[in-house]
Amino acid sequence: MMARSGADFLKALTAPRSVALVGASSNPKKLTARPLNFLRQHGYAGRILPVNPGSDEVMGLPAASSIREIAGPVDHAYILLDADPALAALEQCAQKGVAVVSMLADGFAEAGPTGLARQARAAAIARDADILLIGPNSTGVVSTASGFACTTNAAFATTTLTRGHTAVLSQSGSVIGTLLSRGQERGHGFSTLVSLGNEARHGVGSIGSLLLDDPNTHAFQLFLETIRDAEAIEAFARGATALGKPVVAYMIGISEEGSRLAVSHTGALTGGRAAVSAFLRDVGIHEAELFDTLIEAPHALSRVRFPVTSARRATVISTTGGGGAMVVDQLAARGIEIGALSNAARAELSAQNIPLGHGKLVDVTLAGTKYDTMKAVIDRLIRDPETGVLVVAVGSSAQFNPELAVAPIVDAVRDAPKGAAPVVGFPLPHAPESLALLESAGIPNFRTLETCAETVALMLRPAPAPRIPAAPLPAQLCTRLDDLPGGLQSETVSGALFETLGLTGPGTCLIGPHDVLPDPLGLAFPLVAKLVSPDLPHKSEVGAVALGIASMAELAAAIARMKSSAKDHCPGYRLNGVLLQEMRPGLGEAIIGLTRDPLVGPVVTVGAGGVLTEIYRDTSVRRAPVSLSEARDMISEVKGFAQLRGYRGHPLGDLEALATAVVALSRLALAPRIEEAEINPVAIMAPGAGVLMLDALIRLKEDATS
Amino acid sequence: MMARSGADFLKALTAPRSVALVGASSNPKKLTARPLNFLRQHGYAGRILPVNPGSDEVMGLPAASSIREIAGPVDHAYILLDADPALAALEQCAQKGVAVVSMLADGFAEAGPTGLARQARAAAIARDADILLIGPNSTGVVSTASGFACTTNAAFATTTLTRGHTAVLSQSGSVIGTLLSRGQERGHGFSTLVSLGNEARHGVGSIGSLLLDDPNTHAFQLFLETIRDAEAIEAFARGATALGKPVVAYMIGISEEGSRLAVSHTGALTGGRAAVSAFLRDVGIHEAELFDTLIEAPHALSRVRFPVTSARRATVISTTGGGGAMVVDQLAARGIEIGALSNAARAELSAQNIPLGHGKLVDVTLAGTKYDTMKAVIDRLIRDPETGVLVVAVGSSAQFNPELAVAPIVDAVRDAPKGAAPVVGFPLPHAPESLALLESAGIPNFRTLETCAETVALMLRPAPAPRIPAAPLPAQLCTRLDDLPGGLQSETVSGALFETLGLTGPGTCLIGPHDVLPDPLGLAFPLVAKLVSPDLPHKSEVGAVALGIASMAELAAAIARMKSSAKDHCPGYRLNGVLLQEMRPGLGEAIIGLTRDPLVGPVVTVGAGGVLTEIYRDTSVRRAPVSLSEARDMISEVKGFAQLRGYRGHPLGDLEALATAVVALSRLALAPRIEEAEINPVAIMAPGAGVLMLDALIRLKEDATS
């Protein structure tokens, strides 16, 4: 059998020549009768092949008793049977050479060990037979261009199925109905909608990648409950960015309760929410905070082509002071810079006696309800290099004179030169006709204040940085790792591993049990001194640690005192030496950690350390390894470093050295044996003086094969 | 002239027998022609009296040349003239005995000193003539029941003006159009809508209070840019709570840019956002985060009567797992406890073979699209004492079978006994018919996920605590305050003032320059010792301070060392004594402050102190004075006290004593001379050991009259 190409799969997914409905019922009230009904209703022109061992015919079509009995090729099959018979049917699909199979049944990964075994079996069959497997737990696939409504989802009883350019990939089958209905109400059309179910073998990433080649798909709308295939999702998302096809995701689980439901519902893992959000941002997927933004943003973003500016800036024009101020407020609250009028623009427009307000809102007042005035202002600002996105907030005229209110916006956009600023429209009142007019002119338009602001913020987000491969780990480190046992490593071993990456701790020196103290020591006072002995596990309790030693004389006295105290507490203890270490408290501290998230893989975290970092969740998270520029961004996101950035006259810290340390630690992600690594705390010195690791920890996988 | 009663004003505001339109134009295209047009269009049956010195008739009605020329009484006047002529017209209204006057003109408080003087004049005229003054900068007043659309707001060109029970009070005239249009689209009606403008004399509070007696008004929708009359607003809001009439406010200014626009737009002050939010919450006004919640919540809250439970709990029923999980996620993210099925309820419903899911979502799956199933589940849960609010999230059936989908909800609510849990409906798809059916059955219903969740959160909020008058300040403190000069007080004076409120610092003792050290000292070691001398302003630099003194012997040595060091640095210095103070670092620290917010008056703030409290804005703010129970709530809101609450095994702190200290400091709000007071830091000891003020500060008003 020749391997199928992406084009073969795409065709079989979105416009198959034939589809088998395995287990299709003749009873029109049954769930399993729906796919046949919907395919007919929406005008699918391919062959519909019901399979039903109990009946020769299903709703007027001849039925085969099994898949193998079907005459001729089958591109796509939707298996509507319960779990075990569904697996048997999948086997038959494999034998028959079906390219795409969707499975409705539940009873797989979400259903304990038996279910997990079933799911592994389904995935193996699909792998071996080169099948694109959708589900199980899938309500099916719908493609509007071909009328291929191969689904059990009640939402497709809709009489209209608007063709359009947004593909839907949803881990919840039922939510597809919500997305379809709400999108169509807004005049948005869809290309292909896929209920991904359990993603036994193919999921968001692989099916998304396939749809990148679909000329009907310009944008993606993802509803997520988990991340099962981070690598495939990354490939898909980066491909989408390269093609200018925006991907917007809404993921449940902002609360503990929500996360728990996502798990119980699908048998999926939940990862750290911060890690998942970092992953999505990193690969260029826009995460929607508001559900309505999931509805609006894919469509809006796909209609805007504009030079990506480094400034996150928007200019707001309004006819109504209060309404315009609301828009400015919401944009600014999302970190968007509000562009004021440039002096040149203000002078030119004022010369035409156009009122402009005096604050950052371009408030043209009632004058803006005149076509000429509004057109002149938009024309001018759309060409202003200082404009980022132009947001036009239209008042009551949008409701009563939709043509007049919208005409200057539509005409200005039509007349705009290449490279002009993108324009979005937001009518303050309920104004469906104005929205429709903007829509038909290709101008992004919004019904709600917050969705408008959130989508504009997404428009202004810089494209994700390309992934630069991290430098390979030093050979010395790799060799060392091979020799170590699994589990948590000692501080000394962990520190030595970090040192191979260029990270250093404070100066140390081990004095043999019978050595005379060298003078000079080669260490800077003050020092910490500890007795090294296998018999003193709790050094502080037996007086075998001394802090703040300021001179050679104090050191000699401290050693004598420690020995005497240790002898009192533990007569006959063995002394292996005295460990001296410089005390270097730094101007501030940080914590840097590497963990492996079960969903998205290795992530590096940086925070200011201490209990308050935990309490305030004030950390920055990225997928590891990170580049120096990413590490700098991370540090700038941590509020707790404000003091080291000079807040209230605090001395500056060497945050550049901290960034270098973050990069170094993040590179440990490249060593698969490293399960976890942490430096806590890192002492941060003055600029140029670097950072010091005061306590380091590495945990290796218990399995010794690397 | 007999003083007018509230009923007189209410009548003249909402249903005047006659209205003068001062400056009404005959040119139908002019703004000043709108009120006459709108009054006719919406069927106002009273006398319309245009006033226009240049014309005998305005749009078919005889016009008077001035207000005083009008024959017969005038209840209400809308002055459409520019600022100065408008003031003259207001004088005439005063002479004529008009009860309510609205003013359109700008050029008042927002327009510099001249404008401010005009505004003061307008307020004085209104005060002297017992006029209810609306504006200036007001687009007018509309009352639906009487068809009194006395407004220049273009939004009232609407052909329908839905009568209903929500009153709108807006500081932005244009936003009234947005509220009207969006509310009507949702089938909500309005009672009276007032454009408050600059609130020269009457504003949110006084006009709101007047409308409390309006039988048509069951709820209030406020759009705020500032707070001008905090006391009047409090009286209004507490009155509304007492009558069960919910008040919901949206206030711009969540961003700096938004705040700045509010100021420039209206000439209003902006206060601290946290202080304003604390004020609104304190008086029982629901602050809406989403603008759509301002549209939905007043109406929804006014339709729900339910026993206020102390638990913030909601139970979610859904036919669709993914959609139901979204609702749970959003509710839980707002701090709402998700009610699981009680064991009893689960047993009863399972016995009827109803699927219920296993998580906290009551997921009745497709079975829930059957009337009997959904009715049985709602019937059971509505009666369950463990249910707080019941949220029914309806899937595709809401779109395709609105009658069937909504019938079990409507019937269950109709059949519910007194005291049953309130029910709200949220269709996941776009389902206007289902929304309308819920609406006509009086069941709160929502179009968007987040607005549903936010409104349910508001429903579950406890009623505001009644204001308990704080105990008067001790006479000793008041006498002391009278004698002090204005400005910042010394630490000693500030500390002494706080001591009259029962707050104490660490033990101190002054040893005369020639005294022998008493033994025992009556202080707990360790101590700080300082030489007291007018000649040693920088004590640390000359060695005149000693820390960590652990015994009498160390103290004697330290005093000798300090004297010798001071003598070396400053021969011949005068010694007034040695100040000894206990070193009491505490288990943690707090900062407590009292300030006077320009908008809402005295507020007390508590935080964990230090720079991080500022960086993370981790403080709790309430209007001062506070009760002990409020102080406890404040402390529980501060994340930085997590350690003192035992986070990660940290020793507990005496947070009860801290609450007492917050109450004590907050009482200083009662002394008008105190402009600002702060204890920073407060050291927090172990439970039972209290708190100590380590540094205290009081600033008095420069004006010495108290």
Image (cartoon, coloured by chain):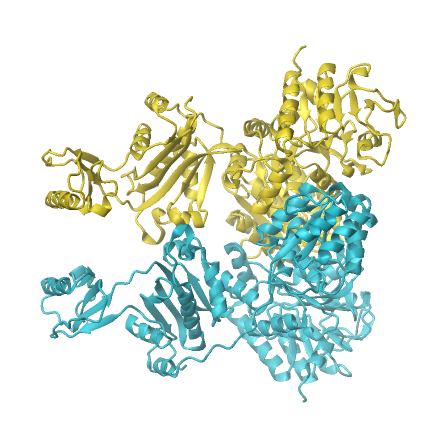
Chain colours: A cyan, B yellow
Q: Is residue B353 visible?
A: no
Q: Nearer the viewer, residue B577 or A189?
A: B577
Q: Residue at x 60, y 30 (%)?
A: B244
Residue lying at the far top in this picture: please name it.
Answer: B1
Give the residue furthest to the bottom: A1
Q: Position of residue A614 (x, y in %)?
A: 41, 56
Q: Quadrant of residue B190?
A: top right
Q: Nearer the viewer, residue B10 or A556?
A: A556
> In the picture provided, is B560 more to the left or to the right than A157?
left
Going by the picture, which residue comes out furthest to the right? B60
Q: Residue at x 76, y 78 (%)?
A: A64
Residue B371 is left or right of residue B518, and the answer is right
Image quadrant for the C terminus of chain A? Answer: bottom left
| Residue A648 place in picture, x, y as percent | 41, 50
Residue A555 to residue B616: above or below? below
Residue B207 location in percent, x, y? 64, 27
- The answer to whether residue A352 is seen in the rendering is yes
Where is A301 relative to B220, above or below?
below
Of residues B273 and B635, the one nearer the viewer is B273
Quarter holding residue A188:
bottom right
Tally the numbered discs.
0
- A118 left or right of A394? left
Residue B266 falls in image quadrant: top right
- For the N terminus of chain A, the image quarter is bottom right
Q: What percent of the width, then of the height, locates residue B82?
A: 74, 29
